[in-house]
Image: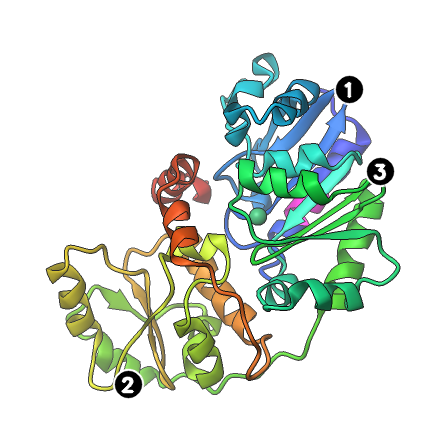
């Protein structure tokens, strides 16, 4: 298929953004371009980082999707019914966040789980902070809503004709522009405006962690930054408070498991098995570091790193808005997310 130069530029930007863990973790984040009535959007479960290695974009018929959104048609939840099948030979499914892209009228939309933005968007007064930081940029703050139809409705209620930035509460950022170059510049500008000092975490105690992992299903993570959420006691306290954004819940489960003094990986593991619960992918040992499941998925590893990167940017004593029990439950019970989890488990994301 012959692609326009803007389409090619979007694939380059997608691969670059997808390879930056400060912007995108695992299969999170998505990009899109509108051409000739078709919205090309990143496929569900695939990684933006792989945009130059494999086909990751799915064609969706834009006007029928927008009409359906207007009617609150539940088919917009997955956008699967709006795929242009002739242009989608590999049968990819559109991102669960396709409606975010459809609702922004600009040609190019980039949605990221930028850690700078998330570290702001989890504050109880995130809307006010965004107002201060984004002066001069036409933006809208959208309070947390589950990705899919609820988020689409929340955006539709707040978006104006000139809105080029969406700050999504407890979630992330979307920027939109008429060219890929302008979208890239806007993304850099907004993430820079949200940048805050990053707390340096103490080093992990690898010997203690190795002892804590003995005979268990857990091991030391290769990415040393994963320890930071446990070795920095303030970050650990923030993590212990619950889940702060959707992909954390989907890939790591509800909240974070923080070991009490005297507990080790095996004793925690036995507790989960007795309760008939699946093993959490990550265990945090305050002051010492983190252990991860031996067979942890690539997506969960990326989210474990994200937890360190987000919590290190949240100042001591900040008043935060955690996801409620109901919000956690609806994320874990959601069909479209189950598809994404399945792809993640199947390792297709590693291709
Ligand atoms: Zn998102």
Q: Residue at x 51, y 31 (%)?
A: 77
Identify which residue, 3 or 197, lies in the foreground. Answer: 197
Q: Which residue is mark 1?
A: 36
Which tag, 2 or 1, sits closer to the chain's start? 1
Spot the residue most to the left.
274
Q: Which residue is mark 2?
A: 208
Residue 210, position as x, y percentages in the image: 26, 79
Q: Residue at x 73, y 33 (%)?
A: 33
What span is in magenta?
12-16
Q: Residue at x 72, y 68 (%)?
A: 129
Q: Dot 3 surroundings within 10 Å: few (below 14), some, or many (20 or more)?
A: some
Image quadrant in which the N terminus is located: top right
| Residue 67 seen | yes
Numbered disc in front, either 2 or 3? 3
Residue 10, position as x, y percentages in the image: 73, 39
Label 3, secondary structure: give it.
Answer: loop
Could you say which disc has been placed on residue 178 in the image?
A: 3
Please identify the quarter of the rendering in which residue 126 is found.
Answer: bottom right
Task: Check if residue 242 falls in the magenta segment.
Answer: no
Q: CA distance from mark 2 to mark 1?
A: 59 Å
- In the rendered structure, the answer to whether residue 92 lies left or right of residue 8 reads left
Q: Are marks 2 and 1 in contact (CB under 8 Å)?
A: no
Label 1, secondary structure: give it.
Answer: loop
Task: Check if residue 13 falls in the magenta segment.
Answer: yes
Identify which residue, 176 or 302, lies in the foreground. Answer: 176
Q: CA distance from mark 1 to mark 3?
A: 14 Å
Please identify the quarter of the rendering in which residue 107 is found.
Answer: top right
Q: Dot 2 surroundings within 10 Å: few (below 14), some, or many (20 or more)?
A: few
In the image, residue 39 sits, relative to residue 289, either above or below, namely above
Please identify the quarter of the rendering in which residue 193 is found.
Answer: bottom right
């Amino acid at each position: 298929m012959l692609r326009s130069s803007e389409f090619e530029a979007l694939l380059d930007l997608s691969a670059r953004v997808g390879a930056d863990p400060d912007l995108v973790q695992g299969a999170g984040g998505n990009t899109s371009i509108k051409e000739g009535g078709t919205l090309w959007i990143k496929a569900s479960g695939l990684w933006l980082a792989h945009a130059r290695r494999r086909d990751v974009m799915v064609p969706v018929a834009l006007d029928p999707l927008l009409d359906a959104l207007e009617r609150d048609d539940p088919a917009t939840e997955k956008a699967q019914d709006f795929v242009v099948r002739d242009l989608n030979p590999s049968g990819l499914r559109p991102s669960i966040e396709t409606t975010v892209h459809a609702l922004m009228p600009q040609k190019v939309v980039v949605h990221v789980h930028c850690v700078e933005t998330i570290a702001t968007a989890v504050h109880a007064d995130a809307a006010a902070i965004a107002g201060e930081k984004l002066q001069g940029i036409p933006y809208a703050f959208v309070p947390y809503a589950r990705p899919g139809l609820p988020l689409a409705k929340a955006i539709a209620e707040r978006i104006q004709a000139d809105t080029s930035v969406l700050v999504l509460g407890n979630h992330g950022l979307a920027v939109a522009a008429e060219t890929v170059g302008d979208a890239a510049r806007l993304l850099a500008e907004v993430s820079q405006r949200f940048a805050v000092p990053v707390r340096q975490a103490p080093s992990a105690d690898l010997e203690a962690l190795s002892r804590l992992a003995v005979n268990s299903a857990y091991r030391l993570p290769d990415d040393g930054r994963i320890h930071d959420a446990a070795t920095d006691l303030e970050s650990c306290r923030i993590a212990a408070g619950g889940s702060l954004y959707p992909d954390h819940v989907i890939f790591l489960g509800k909240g974070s498991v923080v070991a009490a003094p005297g507990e080790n990986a095996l004793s925690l593991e036995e507790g989960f098995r007795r309760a008939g619960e699946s093993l959490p992918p990550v265990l945090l040992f305050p002051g010492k570091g983190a252990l991860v499941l031996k067979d942890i998925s690539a997506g969960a590893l990326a989210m474990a790193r994200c937890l360190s990167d987000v919590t290190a940017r949240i100042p001591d004593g900040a008043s935060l808005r955690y996801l409620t029990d109901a919000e956690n439950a609806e994320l874990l019970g959601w069909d479209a997310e189950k598809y994404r989890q399945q792809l993640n488990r199947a390792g297709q994301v590693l291709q």
